[in-house]
């Protein structure tokens, strides 16, 4: 943990997030969103979640940016929407209340770097057996794989990973069915 | 869409970078047991390597690297590898995706689970790479008259 990084990163994350929302030129917004993803990846890595940071850097800052820019070139460069000014103060109050709720909830999270947080104890607070403690103790014995995250993702939680891959396949097939024109054009030409 | 500027500098730099990006992607997939990463991240990096050439050289030239018709079959075969591992374990007497019952000759115990994880990661990487490239190709699909991006 680097204190300088921890202080400066949220500042830049907020700036890029704000820029991605308010920019009228959509290309600017896309680039700001990409930078936001990369800074989030840095924040994840500085918190010790290296696998999550890697995924965010590759998907958020790499591939998603390309997709968004392609869609912008295909459609319109500038945003057309006008902000709706009705119930302005009510909306602001709702957002502030939700933010306060999130901050209140975050006070109950365990301190980062805590060696004995409740979710990693062998017995949970309600008296049942905790899965996380089993994973930590037995991941290397079960699969001879030093990276515990890989064992959890591919072995213990194999169903989850299978579901994720099926979701990605469904997204790809939907794009295929909606956007690909070649077959349809060929039929029209006949 | 605007016509593409044929900048030789961008083309040469991306041609030089692409093999290294794809090699690092393959490394991330196969080395997920020991370092951060795995099938998803590695597959996305392989797709990024293909997309870099797609963006700079246009879809005509980049067909040499990865044909447009390969994307969806690669994605489906990746998911099929995942299902095949699970169903093989089921066939040899275990539950679905219980790698203790997966069958590789002369490999037993924890090493069997490790090897099964490697096969799963390769399947996930293939699926993610194929589908990301195929989404890009579907988005870029356009009438042949108007030329390239």
Image (cartoon, coloured by chain):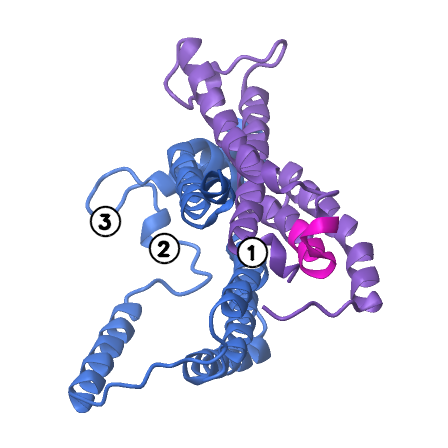
Chain colours: A blue, B purple
Instruction: Please state if B18 lies on the left or on the right of A13 as rendered.
Output: right
Q: Position of residue A164 (x, y in %)?
A: 41, 42
Q: Secondary structure at mark 3?
A: loop
Check the residue under mark 3 and report the chain it is in: A
Could you tell me how far apart the alpha carbons at marks 2 and 3 are, in whole angstroms?
A: 11 Å
Q: Residue at x 63, y 45 (%)?
A: B35
Considering only order in the chain, which callout, 3 or 2, is on the residue closer to the N terminus?
A: 2
Could you tell me how far apart the alpha carbons at marks 3 and 1 are, in whole angstroms?
A: 53 Å
Q: Tell me which secondary structure the magenta stretch mostly adopts.
A: helix
Q: Secondary structure at mark 2?
A: loop
Callout 3–callout 1 Cβ contact below 8 Å: no
Q: Secondary structure at mark 1?
A: helix
Q: Position of residue B76 (x, y in %)?
A: 50, 32
Q: Position of residue A41 (x, y in %)?
A: 54, 64
Asked whether A187 or B44 is in front, the reply is: A187
Q: Which mark is residue A117?
A: 2
Location of residue A27 by image quarter: bottom right
Check the residue under mark 2 and report the chain it is in: A
Asked whether A68 or A107 is in front, the reply is: A68
Q: Residue at x 38, y 81 (%)?
A: A80
Callout 2–callout 3 Cβ contact below 8 Å: no
- Give the tally of numbered discs: 3
Residue receiving disc 3: A125
Could you tell me how far apart the alpha carbons at marks 1 and 2 are, in whole angstroms?
A: 49 Å
Asked whether B31 or A91 is in front, the reply is: A91
Considering the image in quadrants, where does the N terminus of chain B appear? bottom right
Q: Is residue B38 visible?
A: no
Q: Is residue A7 visible?
A: yes
Q: Is residue A72 above or below residue B80?
A: below
Q: Which residues are magenta?
A: B50-61
10 Å neighbourhood of mark 1: few (<14), some, or many (≥20)? some
Q: Which mark is residue B140?
A: 1
């Amino acid at each position: 943990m680097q204190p300088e990084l921890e202080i400066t990163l949220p500042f830049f994350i907020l700036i890029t997030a704000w820029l991605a929302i308010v920019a009228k030129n959509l290309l600017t917004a896309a680039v700001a969103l990409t930078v936001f993803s990369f800074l989030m990846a840095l924040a994840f890595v500085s918190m010790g979640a290296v696998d999550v940071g890697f995924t965010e850097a590759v998907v958020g800052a790499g591939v998603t940016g390309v997709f968004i820019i392609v869609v912008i070139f295909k459609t319109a460069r500038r945003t057309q929407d006008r902000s709706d000014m009705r119930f302005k103060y009510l909306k602001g109050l709702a957002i502030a209340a939700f933010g306060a709720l999130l901050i209140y909830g975050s006070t109950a999270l365990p301190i980062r770097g805590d060696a004995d947080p409740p979710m990693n104890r062998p017995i949970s607070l309600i008296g049942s057996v905790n899965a996380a403690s089993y994973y930590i103790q037995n991941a290397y014995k079960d699969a001879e794989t030093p990276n515990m995250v890989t064992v959890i993702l591919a072995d213990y939680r194999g169903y989850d990973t299978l579901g994720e891959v099926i979701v990605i396949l469904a997204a790809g097939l939907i794009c295929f069915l909606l956007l690909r024109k070649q077959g349809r054009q060929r039929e029209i030409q006949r | 869409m605007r016509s593409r500027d044929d900048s030789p500098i961008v083309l040469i730099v991306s041609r030089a970078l692409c093999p290294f990006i794809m090699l690092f992607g393959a490394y991330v997939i196969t080395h997920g047991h020991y370092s951060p990463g795995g099938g998803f991240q590695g597959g996305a990096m392989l797709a990024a390597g293909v997309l870099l050439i797609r963006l700079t050289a246009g879809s005509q030239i980049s067909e040499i690297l990865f044909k447009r018709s390969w994307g969806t079959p690669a994605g489906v075969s990746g998911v099929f590898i995942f299902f095949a591992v699970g169903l093989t374990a089921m066939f040899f007497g275990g539950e679905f995706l219980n790698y203790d019952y997966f069958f590789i000759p002369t490999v037993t115990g924890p090493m069997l689970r490790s090897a099964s994880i490697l096969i799963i990661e390769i399947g996930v990487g293939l699926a993610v790479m194929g589908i990301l490239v195929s989404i890009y190709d579907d988005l870029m699909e356009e009438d042949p008259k108007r030329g390239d991006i």
